[in-house]
Amino acid sequence: MKKYLLLTNEELKRTAKPYLIVVAVLMLLEFILTAAITKMHEGKIETFMRENGVSMQEAIDAYGKSSFAQVVASGPFLLILGAGMMVILISAFVIWYRDWFGKTNYIYRLLLLPGSRSSIYFAKLTTIVLLMFGFVAIQWLMFFVLAPLHDLLLPPELFERVSIAAVLERSGLMYLYDFYLPNFALIYLFALLLIVFIFTLVLIERSYRKGKKVIRIFLQFVILGAVYGATLLVINSDHLFANEKGMLFLAFTFLYLAFLVIIGLRTVSKKITV
Amino acid sequence: MRKYMHLTAMLAVITIGIGSFFGYAAAQPDLRFRLVEQQGDISWKDRLELTGVINDEDWFTVRGNGKVETSSRFFLADQTLGNDMYEMDAAYPELMRGQPYVNVVSESEERVSLYGLNEKTIEVRVWEKKKSKLTTTVIPKQDIAEDATLHRLISADGNTADLLLEEFDYQNEEVTSKFSIVTVDLKGKRMSKRMIEEGTSHNGDLTVIFDQERTTRENAIFVRTISDGEEVESQSHFVLEAGKLVPFPELDRLVRKDSYGLSQYGDLLVQLPNEEENEPRHEVTIFDLRTMKGKELKLPARSTAKEGDRMIDVVDGKLVLAQQKQDAKEGIVFVQIHDIEKDETVFEAKLKGNEDVQFRLLHANLAER
């Protein structure tokens, strides 16, 4: 346990700087975007009033009031969020490969540490999961900074104040920030599955390295992935109620997750040699 | 502790962020309406019972005495098909498993029947209420276009059923409908189709009035609408008699020619006026198919109608009108009960709900309890 905690802390320490830079850039982009979209809306209203010689109310009738929900629902904002999630997924590759391809061949030091190698696997997995939840948490807090900023940038008659719940609902982000705990858990369980899937792919590639063998194993993964995907499709038919679908999804995801974790652990413990 | 500084810092950020998220989620009020105002005949307080759905998943009942009961329900059916499907889903879920896309529902005391079109078959499902037993009969489809729609059951005797079918004809970029009666023989697992003859010739779209209640009425009423694509120019009405479309001049004379929205409730046809802003009254047209007479009711408008939907139900000689108004902070529903015979509003209530709540009235019940 101590080894696992120390390794997790070490992984986080090594990731902290690039992670903070990425998060800071994304947040900065969100600030700029919120200000830009808000000011563009105001500009449109002013131009419409000037060109058509109409009152502000008539311009608002034509363009509507601005709301923070509109800003978040806009393509670029969702793109930034998507980019954040993509960075997390890429980190799942990077966290392993940097140990092999870095200057110091860090992986050899890790693998030669006394005790079970499963600590290495779980430390890296925990790190990526923490990075993901960290991003989700920071983004959540950002909503409470950006929403007042949006309202502050406009005169009161030009904006509609909406709750964060309405922002999530109208932008489709309710899927990431689901207020219903079981749904929230299901979404992040699926994200965990993706991370574990990437881990297993990387570890198998690192274990065998030979082209043909890797391709054969990769094909097995594709088949398994297809079976899992097909299962989800079957679950998503109109024969099952939402609660039944949820239970089956949970059961199959846990099974698949357990299978991938076992393969990953076996690979780390027995197949990877120094 | 310094050994785990990075881990601690990350956990602290997550705890604050995710913790505040769950705190915020817990503070969100449940999706529900509450009764905030009511006036009119006080005896209606105990008799009003509205059943509806909020945001397609929460089933609720509003009682006139102020109680609002909600429960989460799971639905299988494609709810865009109408209220019938909601009710069937809630009452007989097993009937809805793997249901065909287009459905016609008929219900009697003993059984519920569901008629649907699959790609190559007509599927008839019968749910015996007392035995809780489902029987499915699949009949091969013959001479029916792929995108045909089953509209309603015209008659049924246990062995055979006549259903109204609409098929679409796509020619010269214009879509016209052809109606026919499909007879399904449940024992013989056969079907036959006979086209409905049009008594008059017109250009325009022919549609059927959708009944909001399950029905076995023999006569479907057809409306031929002439429009320029957006505005309705005129409408003429027909009734099906012995396989022919016969003009229905009484209805032509009474209902507004420029308005959609004629609905059937048992023997009554109800037409809501076009949505106008700031109208002090809603003039609702009622046509009684038994007496073949019509009248206009004047209901006080409680909402600028353009802001929300209006939903009606007719029960026990009373018109129940629900008007939904949506604003940034809350959803408001005005409920009015109007005595059709006396043309007087006997009860009014105002309900308030959460923001972004979509309300859909399924049916009203005014039975004395």
Image (spheres, rainbow, N blue to C red):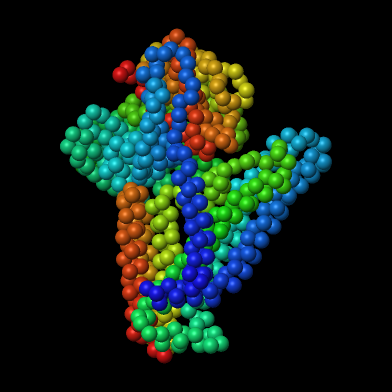
What percent of the width, then of the height, locates residue A77? Answer: 62, 56
User: Between B244 and B359, which is closer to the camera in this rendering?
Assistant: B359
Q: Farthest left residue? A: B131
The answer to whether one can see residue B352 in this image is: yes
Please tell me whether residue B44 is drawn above or below residue A144 in the rendered image. above
Left or right of residue A134, residue A21 in this image: right
Q: Give me the residue at 42% from left, 46% from top.
A: B147
What percent of the width, then of the height, locates residue A267? Answer: 36, 81
What percent of the width, then of the height, locates residue B62? Answer: 40, 27
Left or right of residue A171, residue A217 in this image: left
User: Between B215 and A133, which is closer to the camera in this rendering?
Assistant: A133
The answer to which image quadrant residue B82 occupies is top left
The answer to whether one can see residue B164 in this image is: no
User: Between B84 and B260, which is closer to the camera in this rendering?
Assistant: B84
Please tell me whether residue A138 is drawn above or below residue B22 in the rendered image. below
Q: Give me the residue at 60% from left, 35% from top.
A: B230
Q: Farthest top residue? A: B342
The answer to which image quadrant residue B300 occupies is top right
User: Between B20 and A234, which is closer to the camera in this rendering?
Assistant: B20
What percent of the width, then of the height, locates residue B34? Answer: 45, 29
